[in-house]
Amino acid sequence: MQTTLQRSPVSASSIRVCTTASTRIREVDFENLGFGKVFSDHMFVAEYDGSKWTNMRIMPYGKLMMSPAMSALHYGQAIFEGLKAYRNEQDEVFVFRPIKNARRLNESASRMCMPSLPEDIFMDSITELVGIDRDWIPRKEGESLYIRPVMFATDEYVGVRPSDTYMFFVFTCPVGRYYSGELKVKIELNYTCAYKGGTGHSKAAGNYAAALWPTQKAQEEGYNQILWTDGLTHEYFEESGTMNVVFKAGNSILTPMITDSILDGVTRDSVLRLARDWGYQVEERKVSVREITDLLKAGQLDEAFGVGTAATVAPIRTIGYQGTNYDLRPSDTWEFAPRARKELDLIKQGLVPDVHDWVVRIP
Ligand code: COI
């Protein structure tokens, strides 16, 4: 399926490029990348002046100047995205489904009363930036170049109203896996991260802040992450703090349907597409805690896993519910999640036919 990009009045070819005089790449320990700690040489920056995006440039990665009265700091008009670039043995570079991120950024912008960013500017910022820093893309299994686009309000004003001015920037990080092993997660029955009518569907910075304290408490109890439940009854699953959640029982792949309190994840969508292609029965619907814990107690929950850009496909081995931990079988015996992760890896590296038109090749 061909994608038609929303074009901007400002040509994306007006990106000015100023490259660094000395690369930092030789200082990087590519054997120990971790996640989100190493930053490539360049970043893209653009400004919204109240009526249009302007001053688009690629420049050396570095600190930004800001006013203490910058409104994003006070009232939280800040949204972001996450996507990845991959490089294969033949040195070909691909970005996975960037247009979905461009569109989701604009959905988030609309909910947060921020200006939309023309899709061609989003796409050009990424293709230019990744092209310039392509040597930073690691090649080992599970590694990639994580791309972080961010938009935030820049008005120097303390009253509560939408900002007139904004900044959009994109930087990149060579990364390893976000989660290295099988996860232990806790079903959260007290705290709420997102609520019907709230901003949970948006990739708004504040959503992640709201999750920090309950997640920290769960981590103190030995869990890696939380499985959020709905804010009204705590009877239905929503998503996890860093990814959407999917379950498998028999031939059924179950996942909470997208609502205004659940992020419409790109990896979620891709994994469900593969499941349908492979003949599984995909059920996007309300998934109750009762249903899943009954399956767990009966030993009939075959698989549980998180899906996200950073997390990729992350197997969940243990689920904590009301103080009891329920174990699933080891994930290397599972049939679906490891296959989906492998297939996505091959698609992202351009190593199998891209039948869904998911990858964008960077020249
Ligand atoms: C992503 O998966 O891209 C995210 O933004 C999640 C974040 C926890 C790294």
Image (cartoon, rainbow, N blue to C red):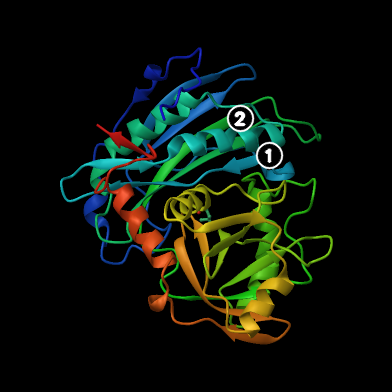
Distance Cα–Cα, label 1 vs label 2 = 9 Å
Quadrant position of the C terminus in the picture:
top left
Please state the horizontal and vertical placement of residue 2, each as a whole percent of the image.
41, 26
Could you tell me residue 214's position as x and y percent? 70, 69
- Give the residue at the far right of this rendering: 232
Question: Which amino acid, by three-letter code, is at mark 2?
Answer: Tyr
- Local crowd size for mark 1, using a 10 Å CA cut-off: few (<14), some (14–19), many (≥20): many
The residue at the point 69 percent across, 67 percent down is 213
Residue 256: percent from left, percent from top: 65, 57
Can you tell me whether the CB of the residue at mark 2 lies under 8 Å from the nearest atom of ligand 1? no
Q: Label 2 belongs to which residue?
A: 166
Q: 95 or 298: which is nearer to us?
A: 298
Asked whether residue 153 is in view, the answer is no
Q: Which residue is mark 1?
A: 77
User: Which residue lies at the image location 67% right of the left edge and 62% below the top edge?
Assistant: 211
- Side of 343 relative to 250 (left or right): left
Q: Contact (CB < 8 A) between labels 1 and 2?
A: yes
Q: Quadrant of residue 160?
A: top right
Instruction: Name the residue furthest top.
Output: 9
Rendering coords of residue 27 (x, y %): 25, 56
Disc on res. 94: none
| Badge 2 density bin: few <14, some 14–19, many ≥20, Cα 10 Å | many
Quarter of the image for the N terminus: give it.
Answer: top left
Between 197 and 113, which is closer to the camera in this rendering? Answer: 197
Q: Amino acid at mark 1?
A: Gln
